[in-house]
Image: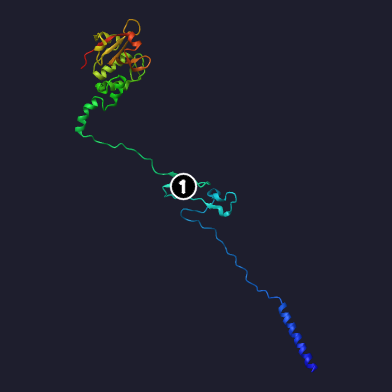
Amino acid sequence: MKNHLLLFTSACILLAATLVSCHTAKPVPVHKPAPVPVRTSPPKPVSGRYRQPKFMSDVYMDHHNKTGATVNAIQPRRQPQKTDPIARMENSDAQQFIVSTEPKATYRVKETRVPVKEIESNEENYLTGKRNPLCRKYAEILETKPKEINNLTLYSFIDKWYGTDYRLGGCDISGIDCSGFAQRLYADVYGIDLLRTSVEQFKNCTRIKHTKDAEEGDLIFFKVRGRRISHVGIYLMNDYFVHASTSNGVMISNLNEEYWAKSYAGIGRLPKN
C-alpha cells in the first residue's frame, strides 16, 4: 500500500514539473526573409503642359508654404504651350501676366463712291464754303462768311505759302520778299507776269482812290521807309491783305493797324483774265 502511494506521488510531482517547464519555456523565434530593396528609376519627363524641373529657376515655392517650405512645396513651373495664343507667367504672389500675341489692328478707310447727281447738287455748296474747310478757315480770319470765299485757287496758294520766311531777293519757299511774293502769286493764280520790284509794280497799275472800292487781288502799296514805295501786298477783303513781312514772313494783316495805316500809299489794279 505504501509503495503504491509513493509511486502515485512521484508521478504527480513529475507531471507538475513538466507543466511548469512548458509554461516557462521561451518561444522559438521565427526567421522571416529580409525585404528585397526596390530599385527606383529616375522620374520620366511628363509630356504635355508640364515638365520635370531641371534647375532651381524652373521651380517656385507654393505661396502657402513660404515660412515652412518642404519638399512637397516645390512644384514644377507651368510652361506655356507653343500653340497657345496667350502666354501666361506665374510669380510667387500667384499673379498672372498675360501677353497677347495677336497682331495689331489695322484701320482702313472705307472707300465710298458718291453718286454723280449728289456731287453736282453739292458742287455749289462746296464752292461757297459750306463743305470746304479751307473756306471756313480763311472766312474766320477775314471776318466774313464761308460763302464769300470764292477763289479757291487764291486761298490754296496763300495757305501753301503762309508762314514762309522773309528773305530779301528770295523767290522760293525757302525765303521770299514782298515783291517776289506778289510776282509769284500773280503768276500762279492769275497768270500775269509782274515786274520784280514794288516800285515798278506801282508804276504799271491803275490807281484806286478809296479803299472801299478795292477788290480781291488788287495790289496795295506802302511807304515804310521815306517817300518811296518800299512794300507791297495783295488785297483780300474787309481791309485785310496778304504780304511777306520782314518780321513774320508771309502773313495776313489789316490795313487799320496803326503801323500799316501810317505807311499806306495806295491801291493799284491790273486787268485780270
Q: Quadrant of the N terminus?
A: bottom right
Where residue 257 appears, as percent x and y from the top left, is 34, 12
Q: Quadrant of residue 236?
A: top left
Taking the image as shown, residue 30 lies to the left or right of residue 110, namely right
Q: Residue furthest top?
A: 227
Colour treatment of the image: rainbow
The one nearer the camera, 39 or 57, is: 57
Q: Quadrant of residue 72?
A: bottom right
Residue position marked by numbered label 1 in the rendering: 88
Q: Residue at x 46, y 47 (%)?
A: 88
Where residue 154 appears, as percent x and y from the top left, is 27, 20
Q: Residue furthest bottom?
A: 1
Residue 61 seen in this snapshot? no
The one nearer the camera, 191 or 121, is: 121
Number of labels in the image equals 1
Q: Quadrant of the C terminus?
A: top left
Up/down of 207 relative to 13, above or below: above
Instruction: Kindly identify the amino acid type of the residue bearing the numbered disc 1.
Output: Arg
Where residue 56 appears, as percent x and y from the top left, is 56, 49
The one nearer the camera, 106 or 253, is: 253
Q: Residue furthest right?
A: 2
Label 1 neighbourhood size at 10 Å, few (<14), some (14-19), many (20+)? some
Q: Residue at x 78, y 93 (%)?
A: 4
Up/down of 131 relative to 216, above or below: below
Residue 119 seen in this snapshot? yes
Q: Residue at x 72, y 82 (%)?
A: 19
Q: Secondary structure at mark 1?
A: strand
